[in-house]
Amino acid sequence: MSAAASTSTSAPAANSGQIITQPPPPSTLRESRIATHSHIKGLGLADDGTAMDFSQGFVGQKLAREALGLHLSLLKMGRHSGRPLLLVGPPGTGKTALALALSQELGSKVPFCAMVGSEVYSGEVKKTEVLGSCFRRAIGLRIKETKEVYEGEVTELTPSEAENPLSGYGKTISHVIVGLKTVKGTKQLRLDPSVYEAIQKERVVVGDVIYIEANTGAVKRVGRSDAYASEYDLEAEEYVPLPKGDVHKRKELVQDVTLHDLDMANARPQGGQDIMSVMGQLVKGGRTEVTDKLRKEINKVVDRYIEQGVAELVPGVLFIDEVHMLDMECFTYLNRALESPMSPYVVLASNRGICTIRGTEYDGPVGSSSTGIRAPHGLPVDLLDRCMIVKTALYSREEIRSVVEMRCKVESIAIAPEALDKLSTEGENSSLRYALQLLTPANILSKGKGRSQVEVDDIAELEDLFLDAKRSTGVLKGLEDLENKY
């Protein structure tokens, strides 16, 4: 076995000037908390593409869901690149929920990047750079590699110590003996000390199933062997079966990365281990601007991988909410990016009618008070002409009741039928968001009064404590009239 002296393949590639094509370490973020759209699991469509009344957390918006279902079919067929989808409708009609449902339908293997139009305004990087990085986040690359690996359950893990030639007082690891077992047999390996460091980073112990890459020495812990599944009554480990075949084998590995991951891996300079390099990395800003030259080099490598059949391009979905917040420079960049051969599927959302396009407020003669170019949804006509537009409508009282009832189940809130009717009425008179925002405070009030469920009195008390947008506007209007009177 030829184990490399380094367990990471990205550092040597960066030092030799090559393009890094290794994925970043997996994220450990947890997504168990209840959020605004926790109940959305999909578009809720039948097999024939029609929208069901209540399915996968979606209620109402049948025409919009059926339109997105057809859009989803085009995405899976790969015939919708460069033609953005625009979701338009009043606030609180489920535009963001539709985009999240689309991402749920596409699955975890398809990249989905969500952003808000105001995110492009940064003091560190250019607006077009922020948009460009989001475009690259929404384009995936599935790399298929056949590697020689040693795979099996760890039966022995014995480091061998030797005298440190640089110091007469300490000892160093000379090599490590690792025993691996499969269904077909066992094998004992004598490995380099750098591989032992990788084993320690993965926190491998006897009984774990691992594989070691023969050419790089990279170690991956797959899980705990299912032979130890009955060792504890309660265990948080993931148990995997004993690998089949020989310990030494050729294995096809599939790695999913995005083009943005490759950009970041090649844009960040590899600093040294001395104290000045570490301090320099700490002082330096967190955001790195990627040059067009580097992106072109990465695109060349990606194109070569695709031609060789090593990699496969996976166009994802870029969702830009509040797209009317972009300015004319961003819209010009969007037009060019949508025509690129490496373009994701773009979904836009706006809740504006006819309004001024940002960045055109001063497009008039010097000294004039120009109001700018007014356009539907705050988008230029040339970009609007490219879009397939889907409209969302306001919810009816029955649909609001179904949504509130579903959120009560998600948040484990017991509510009386009369209180549910009152919340539905409030949602119809003001907005669905206002009705949903009253749920958790009403639950706290009812528990404080010693009740097991939310009653009508709790909702009425909250209406006095918290105003909705319409009542707040009425109060301000009354104060303004009072000031004008005097």
Image (tube, grey):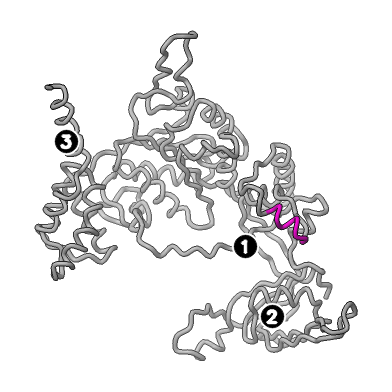
Measure the C-alpha gap from mark 2 to mark 1: 28 Å
Which residue shows up at 73% across the image and 69% down it? 218
- Residue under label 3, please give it: 475
Q: Earlier in the sequence, mark 3 or mark 2?
A: 2
> Can you give x and y, in whole percent of width and height, for residue 261 in the image?
63, 51
Q: Nearer the viewer, residue 256 or 231?
A: 231
Which secondary structure class fits the magenta region best? helix
Q: Is residue 400 above or below residue 476?
A: below
- Residue under label 2, please give it: 245
> Can you give x and y, in whole percent of width and height, for residue 484 in the image?
16, 22
Measure the C-alpha gap from mark 1 to mark 3: 53 Å
Q: Check disc 3: other Cα within 10 Å, few if <14, some if 14-19, many if 20+.
A: few
Which residue shows up at 47% across the image and 35% down it? 84
Q: Which quadrant of the view contains residue 8?
A: bottom right
The answer to whether marks 3 and 2 mark residues whose Cβ atoms lie closer than 8 Å is no
Q: Which mark is residue 25?
A: 1
Q: Earlier in the sequence, mark 1 or mark 3?
A: 1
Q: Secondary structure at mark 2?
A: loop
The quarter of the image holding the C terminus is top left
> Can you give x and y, in whole percent of width and height, for residue 132 in the image?
59, 39
Between marks 1 and 3 in the image, the one whose residue lies nearer the viewer: 3
Q: Earlier in the sequence, mark 2 or mark 1?
A: 1
Residue 246 falls left or right of residue 433: right
Q: Check disc 1: other Cα within 10 Å, few if <14, some if 14-19, many if 20+.
A: few
Instruction: Give amino acid for label 2.
Output: Gly
Q: Secondary structure at mark 3?
A: helix
Instruction: Give amino acid for label 1.
Output: Pro
Which residues are drawn in magenta? 273-281
Q: Check disc 2: other Cα within 10 Å, few if <14, some if 14-19, many if 20+.
A: some
- Toward the bottom, the furthest residue is 231
Q: Nearer the viewer, residue 399 or 92?
A: 92
- Toward the right, the furthest residue is 165
